[in-house]
Amino acid sequence: MEGRRPARRATHAPLTWTLSVTITAAASAAVSTGAEAATKYASPSDGINDVEATFKGLNAGDELILAGGTYELSGRFDFDIVGTEANPIVIRAAEGAQPHFHRAAVDSNIWDFRAQYTIIQGIRFSGGSAGLRIESASHVTIEDCEIDHTRDVALRMNDSGVTYESMRILRNEIHHTGVNGGGTSEGMYLGCNNNGCRLANSLIQGNHVYAIDHQDITQGDGIELKEGSYGTIISDNVVHNTKYPCILTYGAVGNGPPNIIERNLLFGCGDHAIQSAADAIIRNNIILSAAADGIAMQLHQNGTPSNLTVVHNTILGASGSGISVRSASGAVLIANNAIYADGTAIYLGSNAASPTLRGNVGTGSAPSGALSTGNLAYDVVDGNTTGRPPIDLFPTAGGALRDSGDVRDVPSDDFNGTPRNGAADVGAYAFQPGGNQGWPLAATMKDRQPISGTDAGVPDARPSDAGTRDAQGVDAQSPDAEGMDAQSPDAQARDASTALDAGSTTDSGRPPDASAADEDASDGRSNDADTDADADTDADADTDADADGYADAGSAHADAGSAYADAGSAYADAGAYADAAYGDASVSLDAGVEAPESTAAFEGGCSCHQVACARIRAFRHTSALGALGALAALAVVLPRIRARWRHGPRGKPR
């Protein structure tokens, strides 16, 4: 339903003429600012077929406001919409309402869609197979939504051959996947195996992902970023109670800059807390418990540990090692981490390329010189081994974490987003005399934190946003000067996995999710296999297999140095990257500082998707002023018309 009132029919010629002139003038002003965009509305009472038709009819600049209530789905619900950078499409909840899209059947997804320059905000999705299956997309924001009680994956982007560019997954609550039969059931399944599709230059921030550990789940990663994905930031998320790793990333395989995993709180992880194969910067994370290692770097598909930087993390409660590296083929830096382990703090397998170890503090065994002695009871305010909040790991004034790290490896901020100012306080927090002024650790969504500095989550125009200063003063947190020539790892076994993702043609003639190999393999896992079928005249089959053992990964990164020999080159044009991936960083990037809203229609929050929202707000503000001007003109003209009508020419009564 269009959000425009019909013009009132005039009954007198003079009044009709005056109104037409006024409205035409206002309309001309509105057209000059792009007034062809419409505000539309939908409600459960409209009927789901009409609601779907409204979705399909959205054009650039349109805003669709959804009334609260349950939108019950039976058939396939899909749409294909295209906004523009200047005029994105907005689909949002009405003020104070929560629209709820629910599907009782577990063999079909809730939404299947394709979109560009679109914002989806404030909606709940429950039931079905996948919650949101995004078939192709670029510059799409999904924020402040809830996805829960799906049979399989909550949010998936894994259609073969697609590059999902500049996506923003912000402050969503994702929980209780794998009910009613289960499947791989990840919280987020992003990209494809073996570089079959990928997520690029995107932001996964501020989400709360939990209860991904139902007994029927065959895998259950919290956030999984598949091979070939690059330039993506996974920050400020709270992930807990998963069956597989809380966060799992593969290698970028030369497609682009490394992914960044920072400022996340992780606990109750059913495998490793963070697992990465290659091409990642892992910093300022807090890990309270994991069934395997806290941070594991190991062979996975075509990635062997190289181009990995692990700095300023705080790790407790890992049942395996605090940090582990197996079969490294290139540069790996492990520095300034606080690791409190009962057994092994830092484990190095038979590594052909020796990692750089410096400035780490804690308890447990480690290679000679790699770990200075700490004491959890004295080093932090309120440390404990419960493996979950409440806990306060802020450093004490006299503890071993104060100023004991290596100054070469200090990033610009800490877990709270507080500037470190070069101080080498070990672990995820920078010491402050007044104690922890940031978000208290909890099993809830993390408070929005201001983004500060160059390596706080969004690259700026400086050459290398890495967090490690080299001798030239360049922030080069990726490899240091120790060289990156890959050496053949030993004959230690390798994760071997096979997968198949196939399906029949959809009812609309499009092939279904044909992601070629959606597998997940990890050291120590054995023979986990699952099949996921999504139907509604749309089949989506996904088979994952994990096998024990390693094969020789020798030449996978035969010369890792050639890909990232110069850390600066990875972000050689970080300014362009920031603009391309997230728009103008000065418009808040939804990094905790929201731009002010111009009209009540946008009080639900637009989150400044690039500069588009600012432009939308300016347009709406201008349109509102134009409308007010028209009303003011009417206020002046109408009394004169009324007097002329009543008194006739020259003041004579009629």
Image (tube, rainbow, N blue to C red):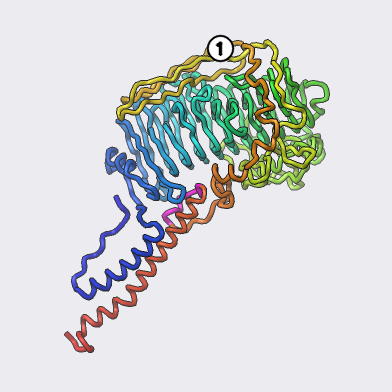
Q: Which quadrant would residue 469 be assigned to in this image?
A: top right
Residue 156 is at least partly visible in this image: no
Q: Which quadrant would residue 72 be assigned to in this image?
A: top left
Whether residue 288 is situated above or below residue 581 in the rendered picture: above
Whether residue 297 is situated above or below residue 527 in the rendered picture: below
> Looking at the picture, which amino acid does disc 1 mark?
Ala
Query: Residue 437 vs residue 187: left or right?
Result: right
Instruction: Give the percent coordinates (x, y) of residue 518.
Output: 49, 21
Whether residue 362 is situated above or below residue 586 in the rendered picture: above
The dominant secondary structure in magenta is loop
Query: Residue 603 vs residue 474: left or right?
Result: left
Observer-nearest residue: 192 or 336?
A: 192
Instruction: Give the percent coordinates (x, y) of residue 205.
Output: 56, 39
Residue beneath the point at 63% across and 26% down: 278
Is residue 289 in the magenta section? no
Is residue 606 in the magenta section? yes
Residue tagged by mark 1? 547
Dot 1, crowdedness within 10 Å: few (<14), some or many (≥20)?
many
Residue 403 is at least partly visible in this image: yes
Residue beneath the point at 38% across and 25% down: 512
Magenta segment range? 600-609
Instruction: Give the percent coordinates (x, y) of residue 168.
Output: 51, 40
Residue beneath the point at 45% across and 54% down: 616
- Under tag 1, what secondary structure? loop
